[in-house]
Image: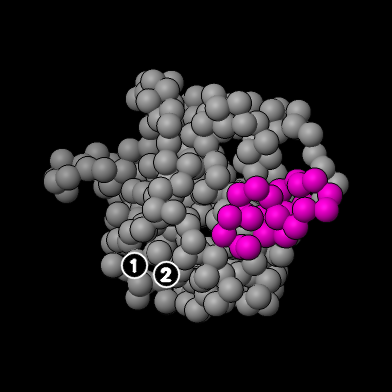
Amino acid sequence: MYAAAGARPMCSVCGVRPAVFYRRFSGHRLCSRCMRASLERGVKRSLRGSNVFRPGVSILVYPSATSPPSSMAFARLVGLVERSYGGRVYTVLPSYFSARQGLHLLKDVVELVEPPPQVERAAGRLEDEVWAPRLLRLERGLASVSAELLGVDAAVLPVSRTVISMAGLEALISSRLHYMWDLDVAEAGGGRPVVLGLRSVEAELIAGYAALEGFDASSRVRPKYIYKHVYKALVTDDKPELEFSSSSTISLLARASKISGCKCRACGAPVPCGSKYCEDCQTIWV
């Protein structure tokens, strides 16, 4: 983002307003209005093809510990997008999630509801630091069960393409390819379907929008990355496109994984028939 207003170049999309953000992937300098429009298009692309993005749907945005401020900004974006489609958008703040600034902006377009007690008990069992691929699986379960207990049609998890790529690299190097399933599937859940709502958006764009809008939040639970240095070595300032091309690799590896006919009661991941929960969800739901 740019500092002094007088030094700002003009937006390369509209050519009218001063730019406030430089998008490395596309090379565009964006004003705040074009930045939000680009994000809204990205959210629509992420939801397209699922049962979530349809007129009159009710959606629960479950905040992700992978990026608390971005989760709040995403919830506001979903509220703005779904308003024109007659949809209803809700969000919850689990006990490990703390919103410090911007909550009033969120309440303007979404309804803040209490997490179900059953979900709060499970969320309270999360460790302070959780390996990123495992965290996404656990969050999908928390979101899915929350939506089911609250009577909402579907849930959306604010997980960006960057986080998906990093988690995929973690799973790949660790030889735990069954986690690739979570990153590729369009929607999954043991209760209600859960969609990764920022699959088409890089982390720095949604984080930049969150900062400009004044959202500030934190989480007791944090994602743990073992091979983050490898990711940083691959995706440098002059090669941001690698982040986007990784999605095809994740899809290929996910399809190569053996898919069971039975699924986890919480997150929806494939499990041996006869098991109620996957190995990860078992730790917080039982």
Which corner quadrant holds the N terminus?
A: top left
Circle on res. 130: none
Front residue of this view, candidates 275 and 225: 275
**Position above or below: 77 against 255:** below
Q: Is residue 281 visible?
A: yes
**Position above or below: 56 against 220:** below
* Region of the chain picked out in magenta, as a range: 263-286
- Residue 94 location in percent, x, y? 46, 68
Circle 1: is it few (<14), some (14-19), or many (20+) Cα within 10 Å?
Answer: some
Colouring scheme, one of rainbow, by chain, secondary structure, one colour: one colour
Say which residue appears at 34% left-offset and 48% top-offset: 208
Circle on res. 99: 1
- Residue 150 location in percent, x, y? 63, 77
Q: Quadrant of residue 152?
A: bottom right
Front residue of this view, candidates 31 and 246: 246
**Position above or below: 178 against 223:** above
Amino acid tagged 2: Ser
Is 121 displayed left or right of 265 in the figure? Answer: left
Q: Provide the secondary structure element on which disc 1 rests.
A: strand
Q: Are marks 1 and 2 in contact (CB under 8 Å)?
A: no
Say which residue appears at 58% left-offset and 55% top-offset: 283
Front residue of this view, candidates 50 and 185: 185
Is 191 displayed left or right of 34 in the figure? Answer: right
- Count of picture labels: 2
- Residue 89 location in percent, x, y? 56, 72
Q: Is residue 14 visible?
A: no
Say which residue appears at 42% left-offset and 23% top-offset: 230
Front residue of this view, candidates 198 and 120: 120
Circle 2: is it few (<14), some (14-19), or many (20+) Cα within 10 Å?
Answer: some
Q: What residue would you read off at disc 2?
A: 95
